[in-house]
Image (tube, rainbow, N blue to C red):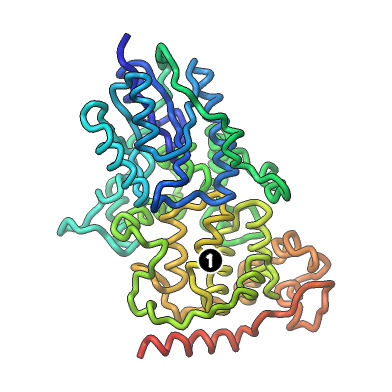
């Protein structure tokens, strides 16, 4: 019998449009493997909300593989060592995987090659982005740093290749290596179980992703008008499925554009994922270091009590608090509200954007290194392509502008009985609703303090 090939799954937990699986299946028997690489130095450990999602997604993937007569082999440890052990026990002749661009995964890929060499080559394939990060370049062959010209250049290559189907037949190996038990990984919260609302909000896995895509297709033409309104279901909510690779961006692009409608705004959002990965490919420490050197001397405040108020949704700004409570309850936050909440932390409270990035990394089910870092640096004004620091969002007027009343009433029950416009700023209207806190700082005071802080580094 032909020697088996290993498929090394990471953030690509699907069978359809899966180039690594297709290549391995064409070679002979397939051994699907997922490694929880938590302890390797410099490997960024997955956040708690993402670990909840991962548990469900691995269960779904294992069931899909089981329908093909396969099983998902689970190992926990350093990726190169685990793969080398599986190669030794099974005689695997090759390892197939989709390329990953986070710095720790690039390190892991190098380590696998160094460990196994040509005896069991690592063959990398594309498929997690519209175009391979690093492939869209300027006329001088340089990577783009600014999103708008990047989008224009990327769009010249669109549409992406048609997605491929799941291989109909995949051969199983003669012998299976040992596997961990998923329950032994303790990915799910115990007591207190803070994720009780997650299961109501999400169905992780490839089948769940397919349902989400199908549900969004009819709504895609209204995306441009509705995506900024948190009180309605105007976004695709595909971000965690895309992050975990339960559906490919190529599949989403073709399904959404397949009816010949103008869905450019949504396509630009899919392209932002590509842009963010291009950013971390150029700047691997983008999630930990400000791109603009002047911010190395920024007078960030050490204010743990105020940070905790922001995390709990107790700032006295209803739109901010609604977003932070939605995040805790569901592992997700509306995109417009993410910007408002992030701006509030950085500019109203003058707390380092990295504190927010770490909180989102732990609490978002779609916590993506590239997107998370790029979005926080955009809001903070510290990034390679970012909003100016002096552009300070006014959360109260943003709340009214984007008609967030029902959103606030849902997530801040202390304000559920208030009508517009009182619900957006009850303190300003003289309301004293229940136990809702007073503003942690006034908007004008916070704005002036932020401008003064910026003046210190501007010179």
Q: Nearer the viewer, residue 258 or 425?
A: 425
Residue drawn at the location 17% of the way across and 58% of the way down:
139
Q: Quadrant of residue 444?
A: bottom right
| Total labels drawn | 1
On the question of residue 218 being in view, the answer is no
Q: Residues within 10 Å of mark 1 (few under 14, many from 20)?
A: many
Q: Is residue 191 above or below residue 321?
A: above
In percent of width and height, residue 430 lies at 80, 83
For the N terminus, the quadrant is: top left
Residue 84: percent from left, percent from top: 34, 30
Can residue 65 be seen here?
A: yes
Mark 1 sits on what residue?
356
Q: Position of residue 258 (x, y in %)?
A: 44, 38
Q: Is residue 402 left or right of residue 156?
A: right
428 above or below 239? below
The residue that appears at 39% across and 81% down in the rendered structure is 297
Q: Residue furthest top?
A: 1
User: Which quadrant is the C terminus positioned in?
Assistant: bottom left
Identify the image quadrant of residue 369: bottom left
Residue placed most toward the observer, 90 or 105: 90
* Residue in the image at 59% along x and 36% along y: 56
Give the residue drawn at x 64%, y 85%.
442
From this view, report whether residue 321 is shown above or below residue 217: below
């Amino acid at each position: 019998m032909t020697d088996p090939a290993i498929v090394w799954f990471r953030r690509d937990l699907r069978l359809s449009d899966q180039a690594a699986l297709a290549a391995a299946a064409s070679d002979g028997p397939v051994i699907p493997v997922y490694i929880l690489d938590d302890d390797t130095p410099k490997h960024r450990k997955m956040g708690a909300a993402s670990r909840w999602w991962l548990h469900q997604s691995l269960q779904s993937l294992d069931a899909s593989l089981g329908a093909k007569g396969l099983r998902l082999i689970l190992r926990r440890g350093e990726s190169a060592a685990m793969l080398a052990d599986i190669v030794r026990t099974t005689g695997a002749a090759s390892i197939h995987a989709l390329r990953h661009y986070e710095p720790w995964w690039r390190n892991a890929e190098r380590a696998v090659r160094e460990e196994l060499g040509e005896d069991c080559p690592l063959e990398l394939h594309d498929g997690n982005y519209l175009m391979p990060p690093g492939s869209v370049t300027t006329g001088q062959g340089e990577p783009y740093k600014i999103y708008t010209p990047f989008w224009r250049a990327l769009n010249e290559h669109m549409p992406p290749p048609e997605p491929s189907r799941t291989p109909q037949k995949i051969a199983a190996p003669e012998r299976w290596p040992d596997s961990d038990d998923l329950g032994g990984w303790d990915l799910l919260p115990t007591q207190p179980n803070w994720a009780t609302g997650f299961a109501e909000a999400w169905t992780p896995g490839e089948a769940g992703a397919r349902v989400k895509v199908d549900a969004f297709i009819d709504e895609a033409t209204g995306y441009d008008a509705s995506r900024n309104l948190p009180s309605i279901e105007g976004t695709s909510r595909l971000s965690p499925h895309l992050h975990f690779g339960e559906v490919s961006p190529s599949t989403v692009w073709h399904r959404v554009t397949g009816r010949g409608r103008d869905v450019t705004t949504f396509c630009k959002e899919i392209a932002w994922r590509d842009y963010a990965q291009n950013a971390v490919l150029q700047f691997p420490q983008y999630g930990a270091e400000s791109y603009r050197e002047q911010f190395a001397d920024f007078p960030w405040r050490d204010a743990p009590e105020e940070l905790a108020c922001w995390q709990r949704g107790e700032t006295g700004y209803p739109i901010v608090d609604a977003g932070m409570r939605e995040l805790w309850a569901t592992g997700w936050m509306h995109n417009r509200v993410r910007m408002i909440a992030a701006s509030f932390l950085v500019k109203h409270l003058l707390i380092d954007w990295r504190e927010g990035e770490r909180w989102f990394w732990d609490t978002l089910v779609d916590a993506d290194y590239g997107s998370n870092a790029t979005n926080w640096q955009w809001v903070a004004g510290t990034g390679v392509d970012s909003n100016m620091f002096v552009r300070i969002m006014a959360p109260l007027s943003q709340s009214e502008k984007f008609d967030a009343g029902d959103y606030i009433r849902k997530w801040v029950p202390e304000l559920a009985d208030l009508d517009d416009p009182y619900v957006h700023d009850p303190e300003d209207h003289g309301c004293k609703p229940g136990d809702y806190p007073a503003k942690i700082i006034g908007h004008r005071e916070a704005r002036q303090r932020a401008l003064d802080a910026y003046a210190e580094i501007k010179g």
